[in-house]
Image (cartoon, helix red, strand yellow):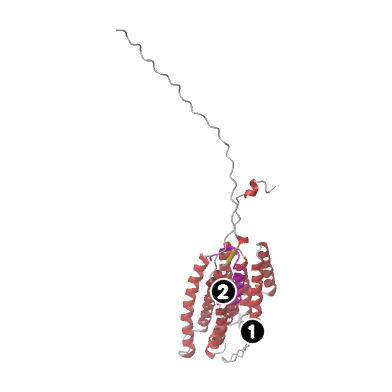
């Protein structure tokens, strides 16, 4: 037998991976930022400022009826006015400086600054609304003071001082600043403005220029005009694209807590003053009546600023929307050369 020849094995060449040509990646054109969509604004959102204005005006009428046209109301107001004895020297200095700093010149300067802020922000509508509110509120207070009568029911023979012009000027300027400034600083400005208005209002009673009811009515006059101009702004911007701003949380909480405590103290103090006037004479002192009036003013300031912060946080038109930093497709296609 012959030996078989060994079988030859096939040798396979190692396969080499074929390299595919890599295509250079081209930058995809960025999408053009979409304009903000219109926000559906409900009837409640639209008409809340108008309802606020009507209720504020009704509040002025109620205060006038209770504290000017009734003998008990005049007695309570007069007690607070004539016994505004503040023994703290620092408090007296603060109130004196606040009253001396509130003048027609300062009011005009602040109005000019408010208009400039609106122009710089490219929000002429806010500047117009703020100016109308300041002028309208102050004109209304002066007109009411001249036209309304004050019968002499408490034997003081004092002329009518309802409502307070100083409180109207201070509150209207503070409201206007909150309206025209950006949302980021409105909270801090509203707190500072509320403190300033409270000092001015209490100082007018301390100086025996106005009664507590005069200053509270002045705050409601300003709130009524603020509601009217805010209603105009919302009607004007109802079909414009933009977002609905939310009120700052911190000032809202502080106004609710501070105003609630002041209102509670006022209710207790007012009850004691009424008992002292009609049931138990000399139950409380005249200074107690003044302090009750001061807490009532503080509660009113907190209430109107709480409402105003929420009303002023209205619509934000598309011109105030943040601008995207992404380049548009025209930039990549040579559109901006």
> Is residue 234 placed above or below 271 in the rendered structure?
above
Could you tell me which quadrant the N terminus lies in? top left
Determine whether the residue tagged by mark 1 lies in a helix, strand or loop.
helix
Which residues lie in the magenta part?
A: 224-246
What is the total number of numbered labels drawn onto the structure image? 2
Q: Which residue: 51% across, 65% down?
A: 250
**Can you tell which quarter of the image residue 244 is in?**
bottom right
Q: Which residue: 64% across, 71% down?
A: 129
- Return the x and y of residue 27 as percentages of the image width and height: 59, 43
Instruction: Tell me how far mark 2 sits from mark 1, CA to CA.
Output: 25 Å
Residue 187: mark in rendering: none
- Badge 2 or badge 1: first in the primary sequence: 2
Does the image show residue 94? no
Determine whether the residue tagged by mark 2 lies in a helix, strand or loop.
helix
Query: Is residue 245 covered in magenta?
Result: yes
| Left or right: 64 in relation to 111 | left
- Residue that badge 2 annotates: 49
Q: How crowded is mark 1: few (under 14 residues within 10 Å), some or many (20 or more)?
A: some
In front of the other: 68 or 224 = 224
In front of the other: 120 or 79 = 120
- Residue that badge 1 annotates: 145
């Amino acid at each position: 037998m012959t030996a078989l020849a060994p079988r030859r094995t096939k040798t396979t060449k190692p396969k080499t991976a074929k390299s595919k040509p890599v295509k250079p990646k081209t930058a995809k054109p960025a999408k053009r930022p979409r304009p903000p969509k219109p926000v559906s604004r409900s009837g409640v959102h639209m008409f809340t400022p108008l309802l606020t204005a009507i209720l504020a005006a009704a509040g002025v009428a109620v205060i006038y009826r209770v504290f000017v046209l009734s003998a008990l109301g005049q007695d309570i107001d007069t007690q607070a006015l004539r016994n505004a004895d503040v023994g703290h020297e620092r408090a007296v200095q603060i109130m004196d400086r606040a009253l001396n700093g509130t003048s027609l010149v300062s009011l005009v300067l602040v109005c000019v600054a408010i208009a400039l802020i609106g122009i710089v922000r490219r929000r002429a509508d806010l500047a117009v609304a703020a100016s109308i509110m300041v002028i309208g509120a102050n004109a209304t207070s002066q007109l009411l003071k001249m036209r309304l009568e004050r019968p002499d029911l408490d034997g003081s023979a004092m002329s009518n001082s309802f409502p307070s012009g100083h409180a109207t000027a201070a509150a209207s300027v503070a409201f206007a600043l909150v309206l025209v400034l950006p949302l980021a600083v409105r909270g801090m400005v509203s707190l500072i403005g509320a403190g300033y208005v409270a000092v001015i209002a209490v100082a007018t009673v301390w100086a025996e220029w106005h009664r507590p009811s005069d200053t509270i009515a002045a705050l409601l006059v300003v709130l009524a005009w603020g509601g009217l101009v805010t209603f105009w702004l919302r009607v004007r911007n109802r079909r414009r694209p933009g977002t609905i701003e939310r009120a700052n949380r911190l000032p809202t909480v502080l106004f609710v807590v501070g105003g609630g405590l002041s209102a509670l103290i006022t209710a207790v103090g007012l009850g004691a003053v009424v008992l002292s006037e009609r049931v138990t004479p000399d139950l409380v002192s005249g200074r107690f009546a003044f302090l009750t009036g001061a807490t009532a003013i503080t509660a009113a300031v907190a209430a109107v600023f709480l409402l105003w912060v929420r009303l002023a946080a209205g619509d934000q038109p598309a011109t105030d929307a943040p601008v995207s930093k992404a380049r548009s497709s025209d930039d990549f296609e040579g559109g901006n050369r």
